[in-house]
Amino acid sequence: MINKNEFFIVAYLILMVLLTACAKHPGRTSPESRLIEGTQVASAGPSPFVTSDYLLGPEDVLDVLVWKNADLSRTVLIRPDGKVSLPLIGDVQAAGLTPSGLRDSIKSRLREYKETPEVSIIVKEVNSYHVFVMGEVVRPGKLLLRSETTLLQALTLSGGFTQYAALDKIVLLRREGGRETRRQLSYKSIVMGKSPEGNIVLKRGDTIIVP
């Protein structure tokens, strides 16, 4: 039989061992806790702009996760040529695909090496949704956007107009299907409600010129 004093000594020694272990690994949590924390970070990381039909573009950063295979999982940047490089399968076209489309493409390539690969794509950073604002604005240049943005919002983000701006001769350049279209817009007409359709939602690569 262990007496009361011996019981407290043993309990004290166990407590000291546990405290020492915690001090050496202050950030260590259970595997379950790490899984929950990782899921929260992953779900909060992608931009709210990313939807199921979002088309990936150059400079977007992706987490490519291959289940039960850390060696094939990577955080990758979509290159200017629209491709990403992955272990085993090499270059894969990413730009112009949805995240699910890229996932299916990677799974198809991996089937040459694995029978039933499971792949997940997480858009970690949206860097390809940008427009250019030129001319008589306070801060001309490239605007990196994180959510859907209208013409008026982009002009506001550029600091507004200078005193020399021709507000009724704003030009929007857009390239679609290999062709560039030009549309002239009037800031005053948009603001006064005469042509609200002119406050269009911008697309990746649009150029706004304020002469």
Image (tube, rainbow, N blue to C red):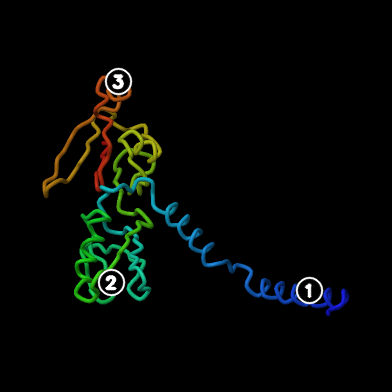
- Amino acid at the residue labelled 2: Leu
Residue 55 placement (x, y as % from top left): 25, 51
Q: Which residue is mark 3?
A: 193
Q: Earlier in the sequence, mark 2 or mark 1?
A: 1
Q: Which residue is mark 2?
A: 86
Foreground mark, 1 or 3, reads 1
User: Label 1, label 3: how many angstroms apart (C-alpha)?
Assistant: 77 Å
Foreground mark, 2 or 1, reads 1
Foreground mark, 2 or 3, reads 2
Along the line of sight, the residue nearer the viewer: 169 or 52? 52
Q: Secondary structure at mark 3?
A: loop
Along the line of sight, the residue nearer the viewer: 104 or 192? 104
User: Label 2, label 1: how many angstroms apart (C-alpha)?
Assistant: 52 Å
Q: Residue at x 34, y 44 (%)?
A: 140
Residue 79 placement (x, y as % from top left): 27, 64
Q: Earlier in the sequence, mark 2 or mark 3?
A: 2
Which label belongs to residue 11? 1
Q: Name the image quarter holding residue 103.
A: bottom left
Instruction: Answer few, some or many: residues within 10 Å of disc 2's Cα (few below 14, many 20 plus, some between 14 and 19).
Output: some
Residue 113 placement (x, y as % from top left): 22, 76
Task: In the rendered view, tell whether residue 155 sits above or below residue 99.
Answer: above
Q: Name the image quarter holding residue 121.
A: bottom left
Q: Residue at x 25, y 77 (%)?
A: 88
Q: Are marks 2 and 3 in contact (CB under 8 Å)?
A: no
- Amino acid at the residue labelled 3: Gly
Q: Secondary structure at mark 1?
A: helix
